[in-house]
Amino acid sequence: MAASIESSKCSESNLRKRRGENLTSAKQTVDSTESENDISKYDKKEKITLQTGTYWLTRIVLLRSIAFIYFVAFGVAYNQNKQLIGERGLMPCKEYLRSVKRYVGGKIGMAALAYTPSILWFMDWEDMDANLDAIALVGLALSGFVLLSGRANMIIMAVLWILYHSIVSVGQLWYSFGWESQLLETGFLGIFLCPFWSLAQMPRHCPPSHISIWTFRWLIGMIKIRGDSCWLDLTCMDYHYETQPVPSPISYYLHHSPWWFHRFETLSNHFIELVVPFFTFMGRRMCMVNGTLQILFQVALIISGNLSFLNWLTIVPSLACFDDLALASLFWPSGGPWQTLMKLQKEKAEGTSSPATKGMFIRRVVNVALGILIAYLSVPVVINLLSPRQVMNTSFDPLRIVNTYGAFGSITKERTEVVFQGTLSANHTDEGVVWEEYEFLCKPGAVDRRPCLITPYHYRLDWLMWFAAFQTYEHNEWVIQIAGRLLANDSTVLSLMAHNPFQSREKPRWVRGEHFRYKFTKPGRATAAQGKWWVRKRIGPYFPPVNLEGLRSYFRSRNWHQPDSY
């Protein structure tokens, strides 16, 4: 009986223990569930605190985008400046600076700086190639740092702007394109996105200014109605892909799209460039619609041809249409910018934000001054926009802070090309003379050569040859200088060529320029089946055959170095 009672007590004790263990387990489960719910609520709360109308992450995206364009631009400058504006270049910038110095009275002062704002005035002119390389390399280093880190201050962005301005100001014809001024304007606005000294990605005492964001939005939009009737009759895209300066392989296929697709493209162009920019003023959602459509439009243009970094650059102001909430998905939730932003948003919601400092007040004054400056400099731009004699790609101030832009206001209806040819024959009039062709790096030449794809990179000489082809050599005397340098097998100019038929051979005795009309081959035709991208027909001579002796007096009359003196 005692054993039975003892057994019963043991069983009861074990049962109580089991019940206790079950209760403890259940309590732990409940606590765990409550903890997970609390974390979930906390996460939801954290997500909800990310509000609209702030631009901390937008600033990082904008700075990296500007840095990317600068990096490409300085890369182009480093690879091509020596050949174009260096000591042995086609248009030496040293000679240009000397001519400006004479024009302003022989002194390097404010007049010279106002006419040609460049730090090259204060550098050693004895080694201009080294100066140009130094500017480009410093630009590459600084822009690379901003691109990789997303960090910048006003000093770095101002230095980048000054360096590129210094190149553009002496670049002459080679830097006469609208995107140079557009990069300078965009870069100038980028200066005011940053704190003066701090390199923090999220400087707490320097929030992005709404005025600064709106100056970027002001850059969006172009006008194409004026300049060519084909924009009104919707036929411009029938020609554009074939006649643009440097077509890509995709240009070939887009050119052969159905006629109705080309009409749709032109109408879409008008809608996006003439109507959509006004969405900016219709609230946050419509502003983001504008930014999205502008970016998609520029991506389509990037795919369709090699237009340098123009379209990449035009994407930059469109990014200002998006606030932190819209761009948050581009950043890791565990990353520094995201975490800092969450703290700032939480402090703002709880009213524990840091009080305004004297530096923040000064910064607001600077931002207001920026807005007033941009508004003032925009007056001639707006007047030009509304003028029946509208001009495109024009600067109205020497620093190129606010400019007017426009690409392909007029569309050429046929493609012509200048083809350089050389021969070893002593007499170019002999029967059976063999003329061999030079090839440029990217522009059309040999009909079976596939169009290149180089965007956002840019071959400046190839682009200028497109302009020269529908003018005459009298309007482009540098073409004759190229001919003279080819006669001398000059390595500087030949480095801008893809193929020299006289490499490791004698120098050519004669060089000439032939003028051709080019058209894309049609898919399915015999020429296309033979692997040819183009068909061409000779128009006539662009410039007659020339030799070194015949060009000496021509070079002397223009104060050029003799072609064989390099």
Image (tube, rainbow, N blue to C red):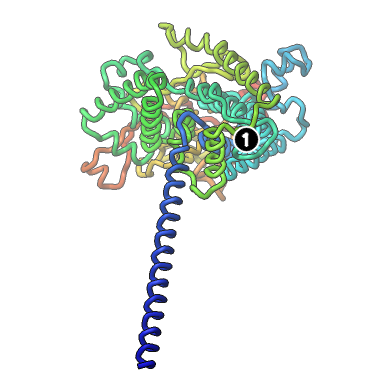
- Closer to the camera in the image, 559 or 262: 262
Image vertical order of residue 374 relative to residue 527, above or below: above
Q: Which residue lies furthest to the front in this view?
A: 1
Which image quadrant: the C terminus? top right
Residue 393, image x, y percentages = 49, 19
Answer with left or right where residue 521 lies relative to residue 110: left
Residue 385, image x, y percentages = 44, 11
Q: Say whether residue 565 is visible.
A: no
Which residue position holds label 1?
204
Label 1 environment density (alpha carbons within 10 Å; few <14, some 14–19, many ≥20) = some
- Closer to the camera in the image, 419 or 28: 28
Q: Residue at x 57, y 42 (%)?
A: 340
Q: Residue at x 37, y 27 (%)?
A: 285
Image vertical order of residue 565 relative to residue 281, above or below: below
To which quarter of the image does residue 284 belong? top left
Residue 80, image x, y percentages = 59, 37
- Closer to the camera in the image, 537 or 280: 280
Q: Say whether residue 291 is visible.
A: yes
Q: Which residue is drawn at 57% across and 17% down?
A: 371
Q: Which residue is drawn at 42% across and 34% down?
A: 246
Which image quadrant: the N terminus? bottom left
Image vertical order of residue 530 relative to residue 544, above or below: below
Residue 512, image x, y percentages = 48, 32
The amino acid type found where label 1 is placed reads Arg
**Dot 1: element:** loop
Answer with left or right where residue 522 lies relative to residue 76: left
Answer with left or right where residue 505 lies relative to residue 385: right
To which quarter of the image does residue 551 belong? top right
